[in-house]
Image: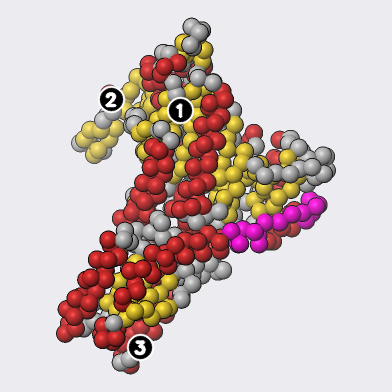
């Protein structure tokens, strides 16, 4: 290799590696570096807001398309409801409003005006008779409409989802994980019986598990939230909980059985088949752009992102190594090969910029593209290509005629390898303890998940949270509390739970 080119590649690699804070030095700084330098998102002009950049939105869009297909296959349909909610609607469900009151953005006036002394001001004459809330979630506005739409058992079940934005005025924010405004889907369903509502709640939870594990390669525990951790206004809340690379938990999705609470609040009744009048049963459920943060922290390393192939905006990036005099011959060489890959459904991106190969290699590693395909003049001469995996940096020199068959297989292997690696990491960092002193030591010095007994009382739960900042993430479906004692009180356990510090 030309020594000048060799030096440039080395310089590029050193320069890019320094641009991301190592995870071991400062995990939070690493995360922010990856989000911004991989081109996923940037900070918005209003504190706590974010701009999702095209690469980040493409990642979210792929996740969205997958889940949208899942819910449509199970009979759900999409609709859209207003961003603005009358304050009186929120007040109709006391527990619900209490849960969101501190996070609500409130609109009080309808216009601005230019004042000759003070410039642009709120027009005091435009004050609303009733303030409106920018939706923190849509239960209240949706149930006001369901009252109009539901009259008979023939109108049930009503299975509606919306893809939307919501605003929750967060004090401490982090890109994708917790922002003042974020994107999500929120499903809201109405049913004739409590049994149907519970079946819907668990169906969605299972779809969330499939989305996380089969597509995001992010292993999760599924189960029930404790009373103090459940959604405001719900009878029961179920969630999927994942372990991030710093061993903290991330609540990645929730599914709520709302019982008849919102039907009572909005007087939503239906006529049964035997001509009786009953309140309907409700569910709500959602996942958000927080999943993008989960993918970053589950798989990322000191080079940047590692994206599961099923959701990656680009599954293969092609980096031609060329000069002006051999560019055309490399293009001619690549055209049929890339056509075959695209015909097989592979998402391919070609990088023909004149930056040095080392710069481009490191940029695409930062962006987490699963496979890099390198082709230079020597490769054209030998009818070969170089294939590099992002997950393990494995490099192979492959015959050109084998690439179309090998790439899809390799993408499947990367998808599986990422999931297995994340699951092994979770297993290595899930602990069992027998004393509260042990519990505190693990939380303070090792981190990760702790599976242990809990007596089911809010007193013990709150005491542990105040003492260690660890919370009950989930009561897992595979719990086995026989013979266990509460890690805090020593009383016989009513549940086996998973404790962790969380985002």
Quarter placement of the N terminus: bottom left
Question: Does residue 71 lie above or below 447 as drawn?
Answer: above
Left or right: 322 as drawn, with respect to 415: left
Q: Residues within 10 Å of mark 2 (few under 14, many from 20)?
A: few
Q: Earlier in the sequence, mark 3 or mark 1?
A: 3
Mark 3 near mark 1, Cβ–Cβ under 8 Å?
no
Q: CA distance from mark 3 to mark 1?
A: 61 Å
Left or right: 89 as drawn, with respect to 116: right
Residue 174 appears anywhere in the view = no
Marks 3 and 1: which is nearer the front?
A: 1
Q: Residue visible at 44% across and 62% down?
A: 412
Quadrant for residue 399, please give it.
Answer: bottom left
Quadrant for residue 385, please give it.
Answer: bottom left
Residue 318 appears anywhere in the view = yes
In the structure shown, which secondary structural element does the residue marked by tag 1 occupy?
strand
Q: CA distance from mark 2 to mark 3?
A: 65 Å
Residue 7 marker: 3
Nearer the observer, 462 or 402:
402
Q: Earlier in the sequence, mark 2 or mark 1?
A: 2
**Is residue 430 covered in magenta?**
yes
In the structure shown, which secondary structural element does the residue marked by tag 3 occupy?
helix
Q: Residue visible at 51% across and 52% down?
A: 213
Question: Which stretch did the figure color magenta?
Answer: 423-438
Left or right: 195 as drawn, with respect to 130: right
Question: Does residue 413 lie above or below 467 as drawn?
Answer: below
Residue 189 marker: 1
The residue under label 2 is 126
Horizontal and vertical percent for residue 58? 33, 54
């Amino acid at each position: 290799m030309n020594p000048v080119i060799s030096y440039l590649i080395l310089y590029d690699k050193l320069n890019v590696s320094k641009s991301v804070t190592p995870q071991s030095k400062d995990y939070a700084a690493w995360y922010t570096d990856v989000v911004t330098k991989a081109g996923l998102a940037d900070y918005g002009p209003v504190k706590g807001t974010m701009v999702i950049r095209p690469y980040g939105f493409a990642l979210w869009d792929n996740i969205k398309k997958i889940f949208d297909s899942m819910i449509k296959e199970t009979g759900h349909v999409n609709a859209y409801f207003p961003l603005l909610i009358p304050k009186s609607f929120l007040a109709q469900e006391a527990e619900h409003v209490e849960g969101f009151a501190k996070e609500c953005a409130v609109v009080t006036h309808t216009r601005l005006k230019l004042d000759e002394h003070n410039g642009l001001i709120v027009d005091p004459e435009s004050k609303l008779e009733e303030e409106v809330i920018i939706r923190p979630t849509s239960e209240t506005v949706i149930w006001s409409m369901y009252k109009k739409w539901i009259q008979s058992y023939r109108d049930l079940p009503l299975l509606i989802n919306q893809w939307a934005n919501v605003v929750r005025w967060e004090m401490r924010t982090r890109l994708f994980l917790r922002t003042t405004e974020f994107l999500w889907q929120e499903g809201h369903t109405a049913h004739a019986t409590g049994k149907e509502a519970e079946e819907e709640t668990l169906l969605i939870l299972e779809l969330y598990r499939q989305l996380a594990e089969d597509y995001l390669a992010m292993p999760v525990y599924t189960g029930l939230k404790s009373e103090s951790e459940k959604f405001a206004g719900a009878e029961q809340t179920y969630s999927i909980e994942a372990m991030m690379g710093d061993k903290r938990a991330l609540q990645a999705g929730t599914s709520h059985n709302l019982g008849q609470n919102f039907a009572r609040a909005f007087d939503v009744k239906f006529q049964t088949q035997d001509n009786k009048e009953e309140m309907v049963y409700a569910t709500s459920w959602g996942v958000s752009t927080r999943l993008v943060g989960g993918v970053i922290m589950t798989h990322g390393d000191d080079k940047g992102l590692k994206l599961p192939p099923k959701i990656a905006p680009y599954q293969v990036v092609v980096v031609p190594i060329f000069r002006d005099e051999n560019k055309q011959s490399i293009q001619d060489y690549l055209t049929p090969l890339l056509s075959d890959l695209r015909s097989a459904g592979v998402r391919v991106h070609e990088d023909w910029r004149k930056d040095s190969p080392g710069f481009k290699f490191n940029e695409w590693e930062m962006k987490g593209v699963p496979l890099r395909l390198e082709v230079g003049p020597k490769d054209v001469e030998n009818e070969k290509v170089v294939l590099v995996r992002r997950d393990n940096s494995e490099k192979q020199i492959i015959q050109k005629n084998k690439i179309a068959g090998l790439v899809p297989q390799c993408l499947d292997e990367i998808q599986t390898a990422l999931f297995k690696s994340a699951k092994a990491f979770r297993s290595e960092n899930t602990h069992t303890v027998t004393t509260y002193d042990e519990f505190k030591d693990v939380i303070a010095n090792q981190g990760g998940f702790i599976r242990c007994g809990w007596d089911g009382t809010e007193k013990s739960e709150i005491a542990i949270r105040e003492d260690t900042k660890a919370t009950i993430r989930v009561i897992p479906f595979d719990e086995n509390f026989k013979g266990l004692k509460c890690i805090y009180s020593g009383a016989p356990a009513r549940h086996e739970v998973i404790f962790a510090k969380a985002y």
